[in-house]
């Protein structure tokens, strides 16, 4: 690959670079005043996500402010249940709420039309790709089936006890729901790749607290099937899998899911990351988002440690979870400067 190829894509192809590419989960969002201003103009959060002009603007905001190596399309993992016919809305200051779970037959019937209902996300990707410099990559994403299913089953963010109980008491019903999500997610990701996404990330934000056999069945299996379906559609876009808080099961995830990179959470050890790299996959992560918010000498020291422990293999610098809304912008700038060697002030003056 030439040096014009975005750093993120070089790492996803297995290269080790002189410095890792950097981007942050939730880099677009409430930590930026320009985001809060844009957000105030939208009717509600869902309408914001479905408006390609506004969503493209939100995607680009952090790219103008910081020398990030990748943009992630502004959308949400809960747009898919909405496209499958389950009502979704956001309560101010509280988070997502979902209406009653439609019967499985209705969900199965809705797969066919779901991608068309998400067409505006494709339009956002087209707009961003046209605006973004060629050396910066564009990432598309979806929620992973189990994580999305927890919201569909519980109707809100939760400790997932009801969803996990359902996995034991109604295994066939859960598998049917996961299958609907595998199929619709694969189609959605194919659409995103065709619209300009150069990498695809699966957010399994709630991979914690699962027994090994359950993890195999509801995380590893569905992730594998999504990647296989996307490949069967002729799409070779690299995947980043994020089995957050899966602890000791992350290694098994890396070995069994054919993703090009494994995104690690805050608790990931240096040894775990190196082992995944040695196995031929890239890793991403894993700065504590609370340390990013706290700042100070401990932040600098941790950034240096991460760079030192993982830069000898394919590595994407990122957080272990998304940017907190009240994170000082100077802390984000400081970390990105430390990783890239580029000055954020000089960028603002361009
Ligand atoms: O990372 C990015 O910058 C891209 C955009 C993105 C959003 N959500 C925008 C968003 C991405 C990748 C997501 C993924 C997402 N959404 C996940 C998985 C990743 C993770 O953080 O664990 C989950 C679990 C959701 C569901 C969701 N969306 C919740 C629980 C909430 C409410 C909590 C909150 O922060 O308010 C959202 C809302 C949401 N999604 C916001 C943003 C910028 C904030 C809404 C607002 O601006 O009012």
Image: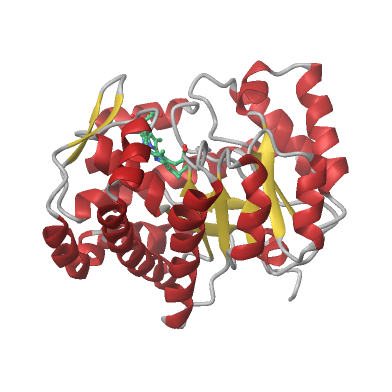
- Measured as percent of width and height from the top left, residue 152 is found at 26, 43
Residues 289 and 148: in front is 148
- Measured as percent of width and height from the top left, residue 280 is found at 76, 66
Give the colour scheme shown.
Answer: secondary structure
Q: Is residue 109 above or below residue 334?
A: below
Q: From the viewer's perspective, is 172 left or right of 57?
A: left
Residue 111 found in image quarter: bottom left
Residues 125 and 343: in front is 125
* Ligand 1 rendered quadrant: top left
- Measured as percent of width and height from the top left, residue 9 is found at 65, 65
Residue sitting farthest toward the front: 169
Q: Is residue 204 above or below residue 179?
A: above
Count of numbered badges drawn on the protein: 0
Residue at 81 percent across and 18 percent down: it is: 297
Q: Is residue 154 above or below residue 204?
A: above
Q: From the viewer's perspective, is 288 left or right of 72?
A: right
Q: From the viewer's perspective, is 273 left or right of 218?
A: right
Residue 22 visible somewhere in the drawing: no
Residue at 77 percent across and 44 percent down: it is: 340
Residue at 32 percent across and 52 percent down: it is: 171
Residues 62 and 181: in front is 181
Q: Quadrant of the C terminus?
A: top right
- Measured as percent of width and height from the top left, residue 70 is found at 59, 52
Residue 1 found in image quarter: bottom right
Residue 178 visible somewhere in the drawing: yes
Residue at 30 percent across and 42 percent down: it is: 166
Q: Is residue 318 above or below residue 180?
A: above
Residue 292 found in image quarter: top right
């Amino acid at each position: 690959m030439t040096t014009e190829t975005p750093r993120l894509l070089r790492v996803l192809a297995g290269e080790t670079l002189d410095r890792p590419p950097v981007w942050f989960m939730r880099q677009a969002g409430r930590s930026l005043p320009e985001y809060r201003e844009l957000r105030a103009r939208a009717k509600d959060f869902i309408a914001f996500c479905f408006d390609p002009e506004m969503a493209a603007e939100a995607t680009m905001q952090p790219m103008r402010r910081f020398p990030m190596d990748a943009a992630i399309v502004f959308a949400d993992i809960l747009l898919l249940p909405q496209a499958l016919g389950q009502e979704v809305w956001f309560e101010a200051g509280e988070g997502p709420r979902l209406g009653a779970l439609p019967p499985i037959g209705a969900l199965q019937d809705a797969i066919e039309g779901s991608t068309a209902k998400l067409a505006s996300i494709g339009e956002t990707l087209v707009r961003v790709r046209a605006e973004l410099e060629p050396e910066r990559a564009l990432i598309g994403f979806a929620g992973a089936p189990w994580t999305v299913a927890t919201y569909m089953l519980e109707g809100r963010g939760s400790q997932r006890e009801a969803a996990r109980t359902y996995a034991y008491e109604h295994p066939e019903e859960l598998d049917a729901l996961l299958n609907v999500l595998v199929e619709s997610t694969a189609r959605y990701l194919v659409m995103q790749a065709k619209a300009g996404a150069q990498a695809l990330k699966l957010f399994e934000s709630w991979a914690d607290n699962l027994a090994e056999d359950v993890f195999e069945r509801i995380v590893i299996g569905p992730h594998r099937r999504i990647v296989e379906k996307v490949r069967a559609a002729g799409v070779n876009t690299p995947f980043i899998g994020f089995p957050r808080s899966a602890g000791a099961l992350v290694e098994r995830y890396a070995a069994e899911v054919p993703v090009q990179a494994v995104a690690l959470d805050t608790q990931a050890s240096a040894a775990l990351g190196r082992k995944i790299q040695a196995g031929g996959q890239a890793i991403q992560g894993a700065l504590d988002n609370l340390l990013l918010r706290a700042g100070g000498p401990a932040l600098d020291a941790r950034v240096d440690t991460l760079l030192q422990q993982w830069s000898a293999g394919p590595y994407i610098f990122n957080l272990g979870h998304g940017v907190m809304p009240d994170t000082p912008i100077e802390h984000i700038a400081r970390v990105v400067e430390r990783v890239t060697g580029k000055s954020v002030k000089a960028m603002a003056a361009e």
